[in-house]
Image: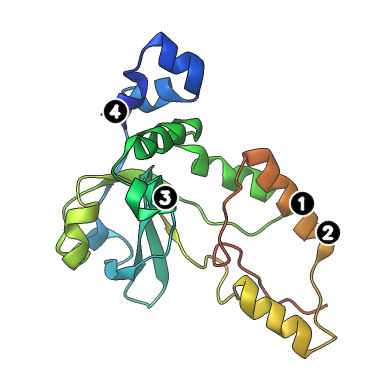
């Protein structure tokens, strides 16, 4: 299968203006595993739509109540545009710019995270098979390439807003500045500029 061969179906002038990016990688024929939600961890059931800005995402839960996330590899950046521009050439330009993101970059991040001693998930990118566990979200996710991972691989954590409140409420609470700096540098290295508040998770640890 190929992911998004349209990225590579452009001429020399287009490439000169908008860049080569990872067009070839999106057009390569590749093999990915099949994601069958009903056969993973006793069955993953869709619970609600996620809050991603550019990817379609879905919250899932297994039989033990553990949360998982299914996130489309294809990006839909038109949501960043004003409504009156979403059906214009601006959408096409913005969509084409998504070829600057490597389609399998999420598989590299855990390797770097482990190297600096940071907690991380172990995502899988695969083809989502039609499954009754998708429920009402079947049309959006079945027969697409998506990333599947545990939402909270290290257990209960706080998002950035809750963490900030805890810092204010108790002076004994503090941030591990060394690890935070390492993680910020990792974001720069990977080019991950658009994390929203819920993507940063904070784990409480005794000192």
Lateral position of residue 202 relative to residue 170, left or right? left
The quarter of the picture where residue 6 lies is top left
Q: State the separation of the CA atoms marked 2 and 4.
A: 41 Å
Residue that lies at the very extreme toward the bottom in this rendered image: 169
Residue that lies at the very extreme toward the top in this rendered image: 12
Q: Which residue is mark 1?
A: 182
CB of mark 1 within 8 Å of CB of mark 4? no
Residue 127 - label? none
Q: State the separation of the CA atoms marked 1 and 3.
A: 32 Å
Observer-nearest of 47 and 49: 49
Looking at the rendered image, the disc whose residue lies closer to the viewer, 2 or 3, is: 3
- Dot 1 crowding, Cα within 10 Å, few <14, some 14–19, many 20+: some
Q: Earlier in the sequence, mark 3 or mark 4?
A: 4
Q: State the separation of the CA atoms marked 2 and 3.
A: 37 Å
Q: Which residue is mark 3?
A: 81
- Identity of the residue drawn at 27% across and 68% down: 46
Q: Which residue is mark 2?
A: 178
CB of mark 1 within 8 Å of CB of mark 2? yes
- Dot 2 crowding, Cα within 10 Å, few <14, some 14–19, many 20+: few
> In which quadrant will I find the N terminus?
top left
Image coordinates for residue 97, horizontal then vertical, percent: 46, 33
From where the camera sits, is residue 8 visible?
yes
Q: Secondary structure at mark 3?
A: loop
Q: Secondary structure at mark 2?
A: helix
- Dot 3 crowding, Cα within 10 Å, few <14, some 14–19, many 20+: few
Q: Is residue 11 above or below residue 22?
A: above
- Identity of the residue drawn at 50% across and 24% down: 21
Q: Is residue 204 above or below residue 130?
A: below
Q: Which residue is mark 4?
A: 2
Image coordinates for residue 90, horizontal then vertical, percent: 39, 38
Q: Secondary structure at mark 4?
A: loop
> In which quadrant will I find the C terminus?
bottom right
């Amino acid at each position: 299968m190929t992911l998004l061969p349209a990225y590579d179906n452009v001429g020399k002038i287009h490439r000169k203006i908008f860049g080569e990016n990872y067009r070839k990688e999106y057009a390569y024929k590749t093999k990915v595993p099949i994601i069958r939600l009903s056969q993973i961890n006793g069955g993953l059931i869709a619970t609600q739509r996620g809050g991603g800005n550019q990817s379609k995402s879905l919250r899932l839960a297994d039989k033990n109540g553990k949360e998982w996330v299914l996130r489309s590899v294809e990006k839909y950046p038109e949501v960043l545009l004003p409504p009156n521009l979403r059906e214009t050439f601006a959408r096409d330009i913005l969509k084409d710019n998504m070829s600057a993101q490597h389609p399998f970059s999420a598989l590299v991040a855990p390797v770097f995270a482990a190297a600096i001693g940071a907690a991380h998930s172990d995502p899988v990118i695969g083809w989502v098979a039609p499954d009754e566990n998708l429920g009402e979200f079947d049309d959006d996710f079945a027969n697409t390439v998506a990333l599947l991972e545990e939402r909270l691989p290290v257990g209960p954590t706080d998002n950035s807003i809750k963490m900030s409140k805890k810092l204010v409420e108790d002076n004994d609470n503090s941030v591990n500045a060394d690890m935070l700096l390492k993680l910020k540098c990792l974001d720069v290295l990977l080019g991950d500029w658009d994390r929203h508040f819920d993507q940063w998770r904070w784990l409480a640890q005794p000192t």
